[in-house]
Image: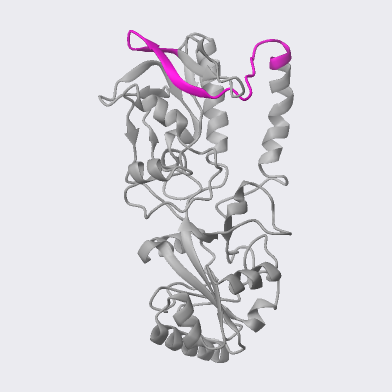
Amino acid sequence: PRTYWSPNRGLDILATITGPWQQLVDAGRITVRLLTPAVALCSQDGRVTGATVEDAQSGTRQDVLARATVLTTGGFAASPEMFARFTPAAPPLASYAAETSTGDGVRMALRLGAQVRNTDAYMTGLGGFKAEPGPGRLRDWRDGWAMVGSANQRAPREIYVDASGRRFINEDEPSNDRREFAVMDLADETFWAVFDSEALFAGECLIKGWHNDDLLAAADAGQFCFAAASIEDLADRAGIGAEGLKHTVAEYNEAVVTGSDRLGRRSPAYPLKTPPFYAFRLQGGSGLSWAGLSVDAQLRVLNAASEPIPGLYAAGEVLGMSALSGDFTVGGMSLTPALGFGRWLGQRLARGRGD
């Protein structure tokens, strides 16, 4: 596995740092400003001298001055405009990022001439769609994005097809990377999960955090989930190539009988034979931004001439996930480097080792 989780995931990190953090706050070494977003960087004679912050309730602004300013403001994967600008190779943004991931730190640095690097880097996540929250679903910032459960989480009961109706990957492929690269090769990163009634009710819902009743309601609405009494009608309603889908279903049903699948599915199961038949239209999406601010080995933000902007530093996803995680999405590699680099910068800058 490329990711190992602690029992409570990110909450275990929070529990670890809360005590030392609170001790520093109580000692007056950290000043906490809640509901006070930074709206601009202050500069004088080419050096960053702090940030202009705004009280969210009164709207009043003030400059908070400092010898060093560190941007740890995250990425821009909830901003279609910034995502298109700095990820030109990707299709239009389908985002499951936190709504606060709007690139504010990158925008502020750009106004001072900062450089953004790795704009050619991009990686998708496997299959999801926009959906309104419903009863029984997990209620957090991911409510607006539903994802199909992958082979690492459950045995597949569906097949995946492209717009022509052809399968493009073995559905129980264990590698997240192979699945994601296969989705990136599709037009607009769009594909369909196709299954029948027997598969629908044979286990947990195919969509993470949903119940089968949610899925049936979505099929009634006919926006991203479609139902029909025949494969031909299903193809017509879902916008899939009918001839390709009919061929694919026949081929896959034969693979279930023989136990030998052309794409290498280890245990072909759940032939598509019991109507109504269902299809989910799915799309690759991103919860992360891959481009980010360019920095040097001291994490000083660089300008267009690759020279450090005096007084300005950066850490975390504001550097771009390609700088933190390489070619693949690895759980924890946005949060953990933010903590590690932030700690390193804090120690270094407190000792006067900045520029």
- Residue 35 covered by magenta stretch: yes
How is colour applied across the structure in the image?
one colour
Give the quarter of the figure containing the C terminus.
top left
Name the outermost residue toward the left: 305
* Image quadrant where residue 208 sits: bottom right
Q: Quadrant of the N terminus?
A: bottom right
Image point 45% across, 78% down: which residue? 263
Q: Quadrant of residue 103?
A: top left
Q: Which residues are magenta?
A: 24-49
* Above/below status of 71 relative to 248: above
- Above/below status of 142 relative to 323: below
Q: Nearer the viewer, residue 79 or 170?
A: 79
The correct choice, above or below, for 72 with respect to 143 in the image is: above
175 or 200: which is nearer to us?
200
Q: Does residue 296 appear in this view?
A: no
Residue 188: give x, y in percent of width and height: 38, 62
Q: Position of residue 336 (x, y in %)?
A: 57, 36
Which residue is depicted at the point 32% across and 48% down? 88
Say how many tags the image has. 0
For the residue pair 48 and 24, the one nearer the viewer reads as: 48
Q: Is residue 275 left or right of residue 92?
A: right
> Which residue occupies 72% across, 59% down?
135
Can residue 58 be seen by looking at this rendering? yes
Residue at the far front in the pictured view: 58
Find out whether residue 84 is within the magenta segment.
Answer: no
Q: Residue at x 40, y 84 (%)?
A: 244
Provide residue 290's location: percent of width, then percent of height.
Answer: 41, 43
